[in-house]
Amino acid sequence: MSVTRKMKLRDILLIVVGTALMAFAVASIFDPSSLITGGFSGLAIIIRQLTKKLVPGGVPLSVTNLILNVPFLLLAVKLKGFRYLLRTGFATVMLSFWLSVLPVIPIAEGDLLLSALYGGLIMGVGIGLVFVAQATTGGTDLIAALIQHFLRHYSTASIMWILDTLIVLFGAYLFGVQMTLYAIIAIYLTSHIADGLIDGLKFSKAAFIITEKPDELSQILMTDLDRGVTGISATGMYSGDAKNMLFCVVAKKEIVQLKELTKECDPNAFVIVTDVREVLGEGFIER
């Protein structure tokens, strides 16, 4: 099986699982608790509440999600091309599908804090998996992309933030400010978890080392830690002396050993340690 085919199958699986998690969070957690977290899912909850007097139980979430997305998907095809919307169209249909078939299991009904925490966690994982598959589920991010097509001086993120804010404020008007405060917790968790999945979960540490013994120290680090070291030409602006700064990326558990080895080799070395969100390459995440 070719690498391209494997990637396509992996992306399809990520979209299927991700949209299932999103649908569960919306139908079983956010909707029973009336938490409006933005997006078309939040708008679907609002429409369902407003139409309960007209339709028994209100308009189903799956129907609203699909109806709201269809015209924007068609417009996106016209503006962006069919291939641009292939994955997004599939993810949108899958989300509506899961919303219509998954049983509602109100696991945190009556507890707004648990609803915000569990809903934000599950929704964040679902959205993150869909984004990793390089797709979206339509909604406000799709509308933002279309608006940005005409308003180039605005970023897609800022437009999406404005749209989601309007939906959340409308939810506050219907369900009260307290609900909105809990919804903000869910929104924060969702974005934080999704960002973690998108950026990668294998966090590492990077060290910048200014030393008078670059050759000796680099050999020690490469031998004892089995990590690559890069020498960067630098100049001390106070002394004017040319220096060779070492750059090394290690796993989190190895940073203590790196500092100890550096201290043993050169007690006067200047070490800067920083967090690394994701590392691709030999010894870390293989491409």
Image (cartoon, rainbow, N blue to C red):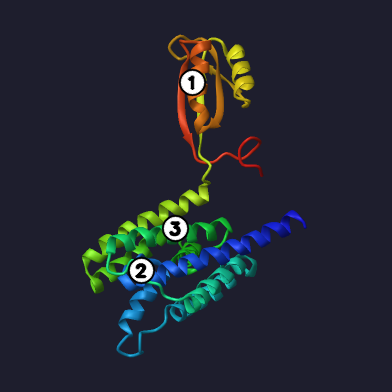
Residue 44 vs residue 13, the one in the foreground:
13
What residue is disc 2 on?
A: 30
Q: Gap in Å between the C-alphas at discs 1 and 2? A: 47 Å
| Residue 235 seen in the figure | no
Q: In the image, residue 9 lies at what x, y percent?
A: 67, 62
Left or right: 226 as drawn, with respect to 184: right
The crowd level at tag 3 (other Cα within 10 Å; few <14, some 14-19, many 20+) is many
Q: Earlier in the sequence, mark 1 or mark 2?
A: 2
In the rendered structure, are the residues bearing label 3 and label 2 in contact, judged by CB atoms less than 8 Å apart? no
Q: Gap in Å between the C-alphas at discs 3 and 2? A: 13 Å
Q: In the image, residue 79 lies at what x, y percent?
A: 57, 69
Residue 93 vs residue 232, the one in the foreground:
93
- Residue appearing at x 35%, y 72% in the figure: 31
Q: In the structure shown, which secondary structural element does the residue marked by tag 3 occupy?
A: helix
Q: In the rendered image, which quarter is residue 40 located in?
A: bottom left
Residue 135 vs residue 77, the one in the foreground:
135
Q: Is residue 175 above or below residue 253?
A: below
What residue is disc 3 on?
A: 124
Q: In the structure shown, which secondary structural element does the residue marked by tag 2 occupy?
A: helix
Q: Is residue 265 above or below residue 60?
A: above
Q: Mark 1 belongs to which amino acid?
A: Lys
What residue is disc 1 on?
A: 259
